Image: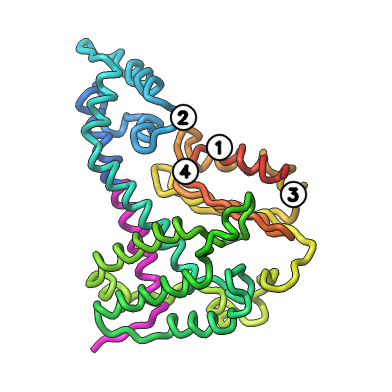
Amino acid sequence: MNFFSGSQLAAAIEDLASLELSQAELILSERIVAQLCSHLPLHSEEIPKKLINGFMRGSTAFNDEQIADEIYRLQRQSTDRQDPMLIVGIIKNSLERERKEIHIRRTQKSAVRQILRAVKDDLENTVTTKPSMVSSFMRSQQDLLTQEIASSDATYIWADRVLELYTDLFVDVNNSLTDTNFKPKGIVSRLAANNYGNAWMRFVKEHMTQLYEKAQVSKPIATTSLMESAFGSDFNLNRTNYNQPPKQTESIRVVIENSGQGAVKFEKTWSSKSEAKAGMNAFFALLKTLVDPNERIDLVEISIESTNGISLSLQEVTQDKIKETLVKLLSA
């Protein structure tokens, strides 16, 4: 009988959720190109990237009228022209199934990313709803990571235990914290947690056999404790213990993750608000070279670690919206 660890299963779940989203994005992109080629006198390689992105994600910076204008421009070579707005409607209607599929995959990836915090986060240096129980939570986390799993059914049981730990750690059950304007970093409301939990358990249940096979060949998931054991004293996190009295320090961290046409994942950390304000233009200039400005970005996480820490997660947003949000947070 083959065994694998909880850490390997966590890695398999994370990888599979990312893979399914990437595959859904690719299928939609190919369908868009095929539809555009059927209405325009162009080969697939001639379809502009911004037109594909407009159909894939929708954007306040590239709306239906602008998509129609681009189609009209590309129609100039053709003697058989259709109404561009009619083409936009036909294509969008034909892609409804694929667009719903992508929404499902993005939702499940967000849920997986969120719930796996229970086994990935450095609990000694993370905000929790019950700081006095951190030692107990750390033991539970280690048990989950090292647990031996020997069947596909056991993957579901393990996932349920992870969800229980996540709820204990990060869910404001009584909404006593998340009703405030600035909730503690990493704490989520009961409603949000229910949505994450349902998507998490549904994903694992639908993929139990696949996850069982994938986990056997997966490397353990990257956690803080794993990195420290690998690098020893050379690995310096420069961390703040959020369950202890706060220090008068601050850092601003922005994580960008996108799996569409402009697939990219990177992050930037500034040591202070003033440094972030000074470096913001250069940051967004770089972002524009990596991702089409008209394209909505899958996931953006902004965190300000200070005495009154702030954590914000945005999905399906434009670069302008990211910049606007960051400016407001830095001015608060």
Type of the residue with mark 4: Ile
Lower position in the chain sequence, tag 3 or tag 2: 2
What is the spatial separation of the Cα atoms under label 3 and label 1, in whole angstroms? 19 Å
Query: Across the whole image, how many numbered discs are drawn on residues?
Result: 4
Residue interval drawn in magenta: 1-25
Question: Against 145, is 54 above or below?
Answer: above
Dominant secondary structure of the magenta stretch? Answer: helix
Closer to the observer: label 2 or label 4? 2
Read off the residue under disc 2: 60
- Residue 297, labelled with which disc? 4
Q: Position of residue 204 (x, y in %)?
A: 30, 67
Quadrant of the image occupied by residue 63 = top left
- Residue 273, labelled with which disc? 3
Q: Are marks 1 and 4 in contact (CB under 8 Å)?
A: no
Residue that appears at 38% across and 82% down:
5
Read off the residue under disc 1: 321
Q: Secondary structure at mark 1?
A: helix
Most extreme residue toward the top is 79
Tell me the colour scheme of the image.
rainbow
What is the spatial separation of the Cα atoms under label 2 and label 4, in whole angstroms? 12 Å
